[in-house]
Amino acid sequence: MTSSTQTRTWVRVINALFALAVCAIVVGNYLPAGRVIGLARASLGIQGEWIGDEAKRITAVQPGGAADRAGLKPGDVLQFDSNRETDWVLAGYRHMPEGFRGSLPVRHPDGSTSIVMLAPERVTYLPTLNDKLALLARLAGLTLGGLIGVFMVWMRPGLMTWSLLFTYLSGFPTRVFADYYLGFGARPGLNLLYFLPPVTMTFIVAMLPFALTFPRNSMARWPWWRRAAMLVLALGWAGFILGRAHIQVFEGPVYASGPYLVWVVVGVLIIIASIVALARTYRRSDGATKARLRWALLGLGIAMVNYVIFMTIMSFSFVTADTTNGSQLTPGNWLFAVTAGVLFPFSFGYAVLRERVVDVQFALSRTLVFGVVSTLVVIFLAVLHWLIGRMIEHSGLAFGLEGLAAIGLGLVLHRASHGITLLVDRVLFRRHHQAEERLRRVTAALPFATDERSIADALVMEPVRNFDLASAALFYRESPEGPFNRVMAQGWSEDHAASLEADSFLVRYLQAEHAPLKLDDPQLLLAGVPEGAALPVLAIPIVNQHVLSAVVLYGAHANHTLLDPDEVELLHQLAKAAATSHQQVRIATLTREIAALTTENSALTREYSVEKLRNDRLEGSLRMLVLEGGQGRR
């Protein structure tokens, strides 16, 4: 048992609050993407190239477009001013109201300048339903990932879980936020929201420490200088991105292509290094650990490969010519939605809940998982419902569609509550559920046991067999004041402790509390117990008529994870049934002993009567002989 499994509640709460604060900052700033769905951008019907900071040279004019109608020709240079709202609209970086018109200074090839009035055409940022659904799916996947990250930080705060959370947040849709910022929120001067996308872009480095610490949640083999070097590199990386890969105004693509390509290359290298780290973890594991890690690492590896493809696809939309819609983002959005919303959560959930690769179940009951999964589904559907509402709010069928969406959401949630329970129980906890059912049957049959050997086997062998425990030992007290002697054990050898002293702290505590006790205090452990996974982690008393008659010590699971609350409760119920059964067996044994003594007493009584009758006859015969002898002498 390691110290990392003994995280205090207040530490988990503080970590979870900080994680929620981080997610609130990110999620609270991408929810306005609902406005981006309906964003109409300005189209002047031109192709051009940016020169300088705020000037664009026209290279081609669309016949019949806004520029053509205004008399603009190839070679003309449009001059924008970032401090003027109308110029932002004409550049395509402002939300354009109906009937908008604006003027721009134009420098002609002959050196003359003029003011041109333009009436741009409205172009939808996300023109098709597929584009909009892809963005919604990506946001939903990011929401789900953030919730999983916060949950893991609460369950097991550490470098691995914090890295997992930041890895998810690195998938923040920065391009969408940039369009929202330029279309709705930007103002002249410093704006803190201006730096949010570059900050989340730097979070991609968190994938490497996650891979290096999975599933141990520590980097014990890394000396301090390696950790310090990694931290310095991460800070330098963040400084570079913040300083160079910022949102650009009137400069074509919203991000500078050079720094963005650096981000893509470094990000791909980090993901490849993460895959290598996971493969190294698998290669260095023993056979049993490999069997548990195999499918989890395969799923994580596939998710990371998809992330590389996602970054590659997204890079083209950033470095290609300036566009007026978000359709180029759609393939990457769908890929990210599948990766972050399906593959990665399923792989990591499988590792945590099914195979117990990550030790969180020491504080995780299945009831809590039901609640968490249900909450995730409800939040997921609620966010989806809200975003769909944003898509249809400006349509003529808005009221009817909102009503249908509300009814559909209610039906889905009603069906989901039962379906989630079945899914979690049958998929994530299938073997665990079957083991619990077997142990419940053992508990139900225990009151009908007829000998103490059966009771001991139910307390020791059945939990070890069903819960895959590394050890279990039953200590029984023969006399009210005597020690507790080991009568049956699994995972204990002859060299280990054979008894528990009646005056030991553990025995006295169990006599006082009569409840299961986690052995996380060194004072509670006795000398001479097994080590490793077989180290006793739970003590359960067996009490008869308020008197402690036996103690059962259980070790951790064979994979070193501790028992979860559901398992502890089942073992407690088993101990209660054993106490009742033991009392009945003792009563039956005493009854049989009393019957045997009664039978023996009756036999002795009969023998006594026969002997007494025989003695009486002998005494009578002796008296007659005495009388006859006296008469003869006369």
Image (tube, helix red, strand yellow):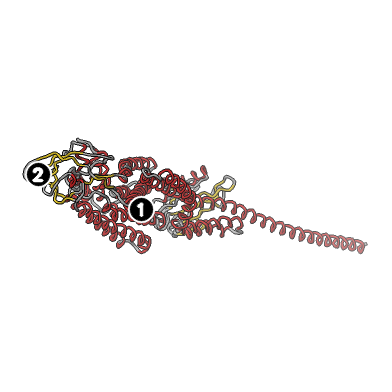
Q: CA distance from mark 2 to mark 1?
A: 52 Å
Q: Nearer the viewer, residue 453 or 165?
A: 165
Q: Is the residue marked by circle 1 packed among few (<14), some (14-19), or many (20+) residues within 10 Å?
A: many
Amino acid type, label 1? Gly
Q: Position of residue 488 (x, y in %)?
A: 50, 58
Sequence order check: which comes first, mark 2 or mark 1?
A: 2
Res 521 seen here: no
Left or right side of 566 for 395: left
- Dot 1: what SS? helix
- The residue depicted at 59 percent of the width and 51 percent of the height is 580
Q: Nearer the viewer, residue 542 or 507?
A: 542
Q: Which label was assigned to residue 341? A: 1
Q: Position of residue 255 (x, y in %)?
A: 20, 47
Depth check, mark 2 against mark 1: the one in front is 2
- Dot 2: what SS? loop
Amino acid type, label 2? His
Asked if residue 571 is positioned above or below residue 31 in the image, the reply reads below
Res 68 seen here: yes
Q: Is the residue marked by circle 2 packed among few (<14), some (14-19), or many (20+) residues within 10 Å?
A: some
Q: Which label was assigned to residue 352? A: none
The C terminus - image quarter: bottom right
Give the labeled residue for mark 2: 108
Q: Nearer the viewer, residue 500 or 456?
A: 456
Residue lying furthest right in this view? 634
Asked if residue 491 is positioned above or below residue 160 in the image, the reply reads below
Q: Splitting the image into 4 quarters, where does residue 288 fall?
A: bottom left
